[in-house]
Amino acid sequence: MSKSKEVKHPEDLKLLGKAGAGFPETVSPDILETFENRYPHRDYVIHFTCEDFTSLCPVTGQPDFAALHIEYVAGKRCIETKSLKFYLASYRNCAAFNEEVANRVLEDLAQACSPRRMKVTGKFASRGGISVTVEAELTGKGARK
């Protein structure tokens, strides 16, 4: 499995504050960066929303549009948002069913930051008159204690 970059000091972040970085061509959790949670003794919820998420239908090759919502309670590490933006943008070239997308994002983010709990919800736009919402969640045994 790939391991995200653990950043010890904010100046070690590779993407944040760096102009001109191009989006990756393929999906890889290696782009994800994390930083130390300064409040690991407290449960607090972090919410990310990506209103313009895009992936590709693996059958037709047409784009699937979604609002992707991520919420988690951090353990010792937090996800750095610019690296998350680049990671999510890489899905625009990825052919995957909606269910796979939500679960893969959950697995990659959980691997990167070992949260206490995490939930990824993909609200995919209607195609053929049917919209799809996928919720993938990591709690209990699968989450870090």
Image (cartoon, rainbow, N blue to C red):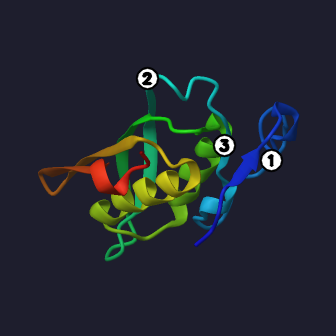
Q: Amino acid at mark 2?
A: Tyr
Task: Tell me the distance, in whole angstroms, between the alpha carbons under discs 2 and 3.
Answer: 17 Å
Residue denoted by label 2: 44
Q: Secondary structure at mark 2?
A: loop
Locate the N terminus by quadrant: bottom right
Q: Residue at x 15, y 57 (%)?
A: 128
How far across and down, in percent of the image, does residue 46 sit?
Answer: 46, 28
Residue denoted by label 1: 21
Labels 2, 3: front one = 2
Q: Is residue 23 visible?
A: no
Task: Tell me the distance, in whole angstroms, between the alpha carbons under discs 1 and 3.
Answer: 18 Å
Nearest the viewer among 23 and 82 is: 82
Q: Amino acid at mark 3?
A: Thr
User: In the image, is 75 to the left or to the right of 24?
Assistant: left
Sooner in the amino-acid sequence: mark 1 or mark 3: 1
Count residues near mark 2 (Cα–Cα under 10 Å), then give few for <14, some for 14-19, many for 20+: few
Q: Amino acid at mark 1?
A: Ala
Residue denoted by label 3: 34
Count residues near mark 1 (Cα–Cα under 10 Å), then give few for <14, some for 14-19, many for 20+: few
- Please tell me whether residue 5 is drawn above or below residue 2 in the rendered image: above
How far across and down, in percent of the image, does residue 59 sit?
Answer: 31, 77
Sooner in the amino-acid sequence: mark 2 or mark 3: 3
Nearest the viewer among 73 and 124 is: 73
Question: Residue most toward the left?
Answer: 129
Q: Secondary structure at mark 1?
A: loop
